[in-house]
Image (spheres, grey):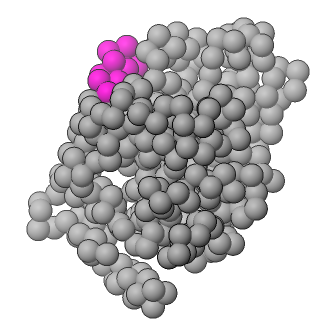
C-alpha cells in the first residue's frame, strides 16, 4: 500500500496545474475539523469509537488502521507525510484553502493545523480560521484567540479576499452575546479591537464572515458587529432518511435566503449530513445526545454525479458574490457525514467529484483529472 501511495503522489506531482487555476474566479475552501491526530486524546478516542461499528468503518480516513478482523478502528501517531499527501491531493482536486476550526495551541485538536503549518508544501493550499465565538472569551476575560489569531492572519499563506485575510466567526447566540459581552455593543468593541490588532500585526483589515444558517441572525448581527459577509458551517433540516438531493436543496435555498438580505455570501456546499455514528456512540462534547436516539435522521450519501452537480452550483453562485469565495462542508467531518478526503483504504471518489466541478469553467479537454484511485 505504501509503495502504491508513493507512486500516486509522484504521479500527482508531475501533473500540470489544473486549468481552473487560471480560468476560475472563485476560491474554493473546505472546512477542516481535525479530531484525527491525537491518539489517546478524548476527541480522537471518540471518533475511533464512532467509526468502529461495521456500518461506519468505510468512513475512516485513508491513514486509519482498520483491522480486517473487525477490531476497533485506530488513528496512528501524527505524520507529516500524511499531511503533505493531503495538501497535494487537495490542491490537485481544486481546493484553494482549508478553513481550520481553531482551538488553543496546546489542544489536541490543533495537531492537524500544526502539521499543516510545518509542511513545506503548505503554499499549495492556503488557510483560513473558523473560530467559535466562545473562544473569544468574555469582556472581563478575553480568550486566547483574541491574542493569537491576529498574528496568524499576517501569515503569507493565509487566504485573502481582495488583499484582506479571511476569518470566519460562528456559533453565536443572543444569550452568549449578553452573558459574555454585556450586549451587542460589547461584542462590537471586541470585533473592532480584533481588527486593530490584526492591522498592528501587519495582516491588514480582516474580511470577517459570520457563520450562521439563521437569516435573522445574519440580518441583525452582520451590520451591528461591522462584519463583512455571511456563511454557514453546515446546512441541514433534520430530515428522516432523506435523499441527498434534499440536502443539496436545503443548502441552496439557504444561500438564496442569505443573499436576499443584501449581504455578501460565502456559500457552503454540503458533501453530506449523517450523524448516525455519533448517535450510536455519542461523543463527549454532545452531552445532549442519547445513544440511538435519532438514528432515522440523516441524508443519504451523494453519488459522485450528485456531488459534482451541487458543487458546480455552489461555485456558480459564489461567482456572483463580491467575495468570490465558496466553502465546502467538509474536508474531514467523517463521523458527521461530510467529507472530501480519501477514506480507507484509498477511496477518492469525492475528490474526483470536486475536480469535475472545479474544472467546469475551463474546456473539458484542458481539465486535469485525478487518477482512478
28 in relation to 350, above or below: above
- Residue in the image at 31% along x and 75% along y: 373
- Where is residue 243 drawn, in percent x and y? 26, 37
Left or right: 113, with 271 as reference point: right
Q: Identify the residue shown where x is 65% and y is 43%.
A: 283
Q: Is residue 252 magenta?
A: yes
Q: x, y (%) of residue 136?
A: 74, 30
The image quadrant of residue 48 is bottom right
Q: Quadrant of residue 148?
A: top right
Q: Give the range drawn in magenta.
A: 250-264
Q: Is residue 128 magenta?
A: no
Which corner quadrant holds the N terminus? Answer: bottom left
Horizontally, residue 271 falls left or right of residue 320, namely: right
Instruction: Give the residue drawn at x 62%, y 41%.
Output: 282
Residue sitting farthest toward the bottom: 3
Residue 340 in the image, given as x and y percentages of width and height: 40, 56
Front residue of 274 and 108: 274
Amino acid at each position: 500500500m505504501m509503495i502504491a501511495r508513493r507512486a500516486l503522489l509522484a504521479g500527482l506531482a508531475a501533473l500540470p496545474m489544473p486549468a481552473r487555476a487560471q480560468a476560475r474566479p472563485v476560491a474554493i475552501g473546505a472546512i477542516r475539523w481535525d479530531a484525527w491526530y491525537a491518539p489517546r486524546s478524548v476527541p480522537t478516542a471518540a471518533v475511533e469509537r464512532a467509526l468502529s461499528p461495521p456500518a461506519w468503518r468505510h468512513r475512516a480516513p485513508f491513514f486509519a488502521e482498520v483491522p480486517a478482523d473487525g477490531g476497533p478502528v485506530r488513528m496512528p501517531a501524527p505524520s507529516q507525510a500524511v499531511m503533505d499527501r493531503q495538501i497535494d491531493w487537495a490542491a490537485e482536486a481544486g481546493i484553494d484553502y482549508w478553513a481550520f476550526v481553531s482551538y488553543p495551541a496546546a489542544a489536541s485538536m490543533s495537531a492537524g493545523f500544526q502539521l499543516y503549518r510545518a509542511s513545506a508544501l503548505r503554499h499549495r493550499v492556503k488557510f483560513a480560521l473558523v473560530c467559535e465565538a466562545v473562544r473569544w472569551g468574555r469582556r472581563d476575560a478575553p480568550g486566547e484567540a483574541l491574542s493569537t489569531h491576529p498574528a496568524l492572519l499576517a501569515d503569507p499563506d493565509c487566504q485573502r479576499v481582495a488583499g484582506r485575510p479571511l476569518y470566519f466567526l460562528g456559533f453565536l447566540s443572543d444569550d452568549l452575546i449578553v452573558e459574555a459581552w454585556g450586549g451587542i455593543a460589547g461584542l462590537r468593541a471586541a470585533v473592532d479591537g480584533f481588527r486593530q490588532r490584526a492591522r498592528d500585526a501587519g495582516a491588514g483589515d480582516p474580511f470577517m464572515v459570520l457563520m450562521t444558517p439563521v437569516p435573522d441572525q445574519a440580518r441583525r448581527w452582520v451590520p451591528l458587529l461591522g462584519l463583512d459577509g455571511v456563511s454557514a458551517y453546515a446546512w441541514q433540516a433534520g430530515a428522516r432518511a432523506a435523499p441527498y438531493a434534499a440536502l443539496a436543496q436545503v443548502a441552496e435555498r439557504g444561500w438564496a435566503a442569505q443573499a436576499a438580505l443584501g449581504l455578501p455570501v460565502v456559500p457552503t456546499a454540503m458533501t453530506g449530513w449523517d450523524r448516525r455514528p455519533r448517535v450510536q456512540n455519542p461523543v463527549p462534547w454532545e452531552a445532549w445526545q442519547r445513544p440511538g436516539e435519532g438514528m432515522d435522521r440523516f441524508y443519504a450519501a451523494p453519488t459522485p454525479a450528485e456531488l459534482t452537480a451541487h458543487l458546480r452550483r455552489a461555485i456558480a453562485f459564489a461567482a456572483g458574490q463580491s467575495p468570490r469565495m465558496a466553502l465546502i462542508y467538509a474536508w474531514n467531518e467523517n463521523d458527521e457525514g461530510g467529507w472530501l478526503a480519501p477514506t480507507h483504504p484509498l477511496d477518492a471518489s469525492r475528490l474526483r467529484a470536486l475536480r469535475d466541478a472545479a474544472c467546469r469553467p475551463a474546456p473539458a479537454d484542458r481539465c486535469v483529472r485525478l487518477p482512478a484511485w
